[in-house]
Image (cartoon, helix red, strand yellow):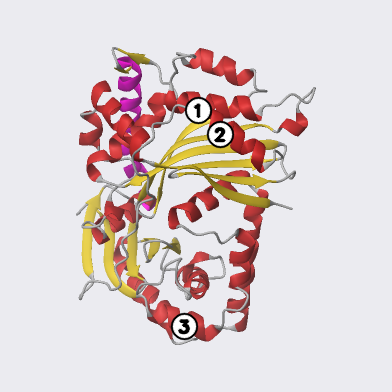
Amino acid sequence: MMEVVRRELLPGVWLRSVHTHKFKSSYLSMTFLVPLKQETAAANALIPSVLRRGTAVHPDLESLSAALDQLYGGAIEPVMRKKGESQCVGFLASFLDDAYTLEGEPILERAAALLGELLLKPYTQNGAFCPDYTAGERANLIDRIRAQVNDKRRYALSRLTQLMCREEAFGVDKLGDEASAAALTPRKLWRQYQQLLRTGALELYYCGSASPERVEGAFRAALEGLPQGEERVIPDCEVRLHAVPEPQIMEDRMDVTQGKLALGFRTGGITCWEEEYPALVLCNAIFGATPLSKLFLNVREKRSLCYYASSTLEKMKGLLLVSSGIEFDQYQQAKDEILAQLEAVRRGEIEDWELEGARRTLIGGHLSTLDDQSRLEEFWLGQAAAGLETGVEELAESFRAVTREQVAAAARKLELDTVYFLNGLEG
């Protein structure tokens, strides 16, 4: 049994406590949600990594590791995520749950205090971040930005969203760009960090056996030095109702052995806030999001046009994205067949086994989130970014009543916006 409580500790600072005895570890996070912008994305991405290098009390990794060892070998990691058009900046932490300590000693308060220390009491030199720490983590960030091209499947989807949303915040990469990262100095980063502390909406999370009241007390004490006074608001997410009049077709060429074909659809305004959302999720599952989907069984298995083919939803942005790997000369056939499978869904040509198989897969997949602390935290962060309080079980239940006609109606709202093809080098 899980009890989920969300409270506002301070203006714009929210705590979600998941009270459960299901796990042997407790899971905590502190996450700022700020608007995703090209000019600040790289700095925000760098901040948690620099903060994790040392604090005023524990000025280096060695002393921080010693502090974590004293908490039964807990772990705190910097993390950067993207939810809708919010850049999510902060830390994830995992510690032994108090119920399993050797002599019943409490860990929660000390763990929350260490998180607060990392967030609010950084190691500084001359009134700014340590130059060595900044330089080292800046180089790591640039490496991560450059390395994104190495995973061609993800890279193609990233390029697709950049092209589809080049005039929208969603088109900005969560890590920022290399030029912006390279220009960051300790003092520039310090100024952005102060801005983050003053204006970022702060989402706190706990999952473990402690009572919500005790969790609230631990986090309040940990955040005692957080600046107050300026408004903290979770960023909105722009939703475009319709695709461009004619689908834009874009191609890049690289030294690759397999082509990557990605198609981006607008959902006609169906997002996680709409009544039709469960039908769209089931539509996506039938179309391309499960091993029983039309893309997998028909485009990949029966016609062998793709090495892989799948689809994903961006629930806050109102996008459905198709990803596939193909032979270079199969571009037109693969594209035509992907669109043909969508047309079949639009016409309601969905077998009973397809509908019920997708429904069972969706419900089972959602309910399995309850058994995984990291997925559960990710789920609730997404709900917080969207301003929703629908729980995992309630969302899973919403799929049970969706009909074939509702799935087809959701599919008919999908409009092709952009086609992206990562081709091989000529010759």
Residue 237 on image: x %, y %? 34, 58
Q: Which residue is mark 3?
A: 408
Q: Amino acid under label 3?
A: Ala
Q: Is residue 361 magenta?
A: no
Give the left or right position of residue 111, taking residue 46 as reference: right
Residue 268 on image: x %, y %? 34, 74
Residue 66 on image: x %, y %? 58, 15
In this view, the residue in front, 205 or 12, is 12
Instruction: Sort mark 1 into few (<14), some (14-19) or many (20+) by Cα contacts within 10 Å.
Output: many
Q: Do the residues bearing badges 1 and 3 touch, measured as CB atoms within 8 Å?
A: no
Q: Which residue is mark 1?
A: 116
User: Is the residue 289 above or below the residue 226 in the image?
Assistant: below
Instruction: Sort mark 2 into few (<14), some (14-19) or many (20+) by Cα contacts within 10 Å.
Output: many
Q: Do the residues bearing badges 1 and 2 touch, measured as CB atoms within 8 Å?
A: yes
- Write the start and end of the magenta stretch as one range: 130-153
Kindly identify which numbered label has been placed on residue 219.
2
* Residue at 31% across, 27% down: 138
Residue 74 seen in the figure:
no
